[in-house]
Amino acid sequence: MKLDSDLQSIQEVRNCLHEAKAGQKQLERMTQAQVDAIVRSMAEAAEAEAERLGAMASEETGYGKPADKKAKNLFVAREVYGSIKDMPTVGIIRRDEDRRVWEVAQPVGIVAAIIPSTNPTSTVIFKCLIALKARNAIVISPHPGAVRCCLETAKIMRQAAEKAGAPPGLIQCLSQPSIEASGELMKHKLTDLILATGGTAMVKAAYSSGKPAYGVGPGNVPAYVHRSADLAKAVRLILQSKMFDWGTICASEQAIVVDREVKARLAEELKRQGAHFLNEEEKRKVASVIMAGKGLNPKIVGKSPQAIAGMAGVSVPPDARALVAEESEVGLDYPWSVEKLSPLLALYTVSDWQEGCRRCVELLELGGLGHTLGIHCEELPVIEAFGLEKPASRIVVNSGTTFGGIGATTGIQPSMTLGCGSFGNNITSDNIGPQHLLNIKRVAFGIREMETPAEAEAVHSAADKALQTLQDQGKLGITREEVLKIVQSVLTELQFK
């Protein structure tokens, strides 16, 4: 009997989970050295295949640039791997000898990984590395528009892992992804944790599955340019960030918010460095292709400025690096104010940093709560105000937000999955790593006896008498708390003799 495609995809999920479970039970018994050798082999294979996989991703999805897809793959293979390679994830990983507590790492089991079409190969590499580093198996559910490149990436990761001694079955990738398959994967009894990167609906489904889940919200990232900023540097960093893979990383800038005092100079610098400003008619035409219904038009995602302008019937120079439109309003009725995932930038003008704060919050509230905010500024009090007040989990200072948010140009943990915290209805505000895919157990030794109320009163009474005696003797350089600790220590020693 021939099964319907949805039934076939559900059966594939179940088969993958059972194979993954068998492999994970073997991986769980491996040593730290064995696990590290497996992860190193995977990273090396990803580095060797970075260019080919990047080209596959760009060709299949139609998003971004092959060279930048390669760069993302290399970022994971080098920077992410470098940040996790020495991380302890097996056995006792920390010993606090003062508090007599040991921390023991245990894998969660099977990770269900939802993969977006915007960053497919780099996200597969990333999630495979952190899952196996924490001794978990992984079942990958690719976006339907990125199946071939995800399957190939998973195959490379699996072969490299098994070459280094990993048990078979640890890395699985669905070949027939569907809504039904994703639902089955996220809710199946063998799935232990969900790592979801995708649209809002997918993240909500992950959190509604009844399983522990790390979801990633959208990133409508504003970049505030303060009057003290180095304007030439700020523009260079913003354009470099925005142009990278044609804006497909969710941490890329979506709007520039600039102080009026330096707005004219900023605009000139943007033009000098290759940004093309649209007039009101051109702005309206491009706005008409940004949205499709109530959501972002997928046809503009990861496309060049020239391709997007062509869709809108607008002519722009062949060397235009980004399209800029001045905007004064925020909301779904103003398409330039939404997350655009393409080289389109809205430009807002504000009177000072306080108004800049309010405008940035409005943009975040529209669709980027908890994600990322950029600020270009040389005045620390202003930077501190942005860091303290803004509902964003990453405040990137004097760097492009694409690279700063993922930890390529900042000291944040390198990652391709960026939590948005409770601001964005996520469980964490961290950049996700292997530590989020572990259960940490505590072995805690008794270090004190629980006192009865009578015993506690007697100890405090003894401490007060001792303190009074010391004071009568003119010894005033000791506090009551110090005396109390001495009395408690003496009584504890006597109790155990």
Image: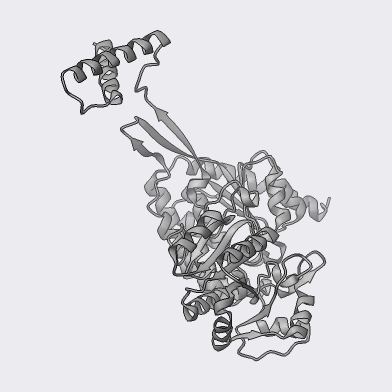
Judge whether residue 495 can be spotted in this image.
yes
Q: Is residue 456 above or below residue 398?
A: above
Q: Please, which residue is most extreme toward the top here? A: 454
Q: Is residue 181 above or below residue 82?
A: above
Judge whether residue 116 can be spotted in this image.
no
| x then y, percent, for residue 6 | 79, 53
| x then y, percent, for residue 351 | 60, 71
Which of the 4 image quadrants contains residue 21?
top right
Which quadrant, please, contains the C terminus?
top left
Residue 308 left/right relative to 31: right
Q: Please, which residue is most extreme toward the left here? A: 473
Residue in the foreground of this view, choosing between 442 and 476:
476
Residue 168 left/right relative to 31: right
Residue in the foreground of this view, choosing between 125 and 374:
374
| x then y, percent, for residue 180 | 77, 51
Q: Is residue 424 above or below residue 18?
A: below
**Colour scheme of the rendered structure:** one colour
Residue 40 left/right relative to 125: left
Residue at image location 57% in from the left, 83% down from the top? 270
Question: Number of numbered discs present?
Answer: 0
| x then y, percent, for residue 235 | 53, 79
Which of the 4 image quadrants contains residue 211?
top right
Residue in the foreground of this view, choosing between 392 and 132:
392
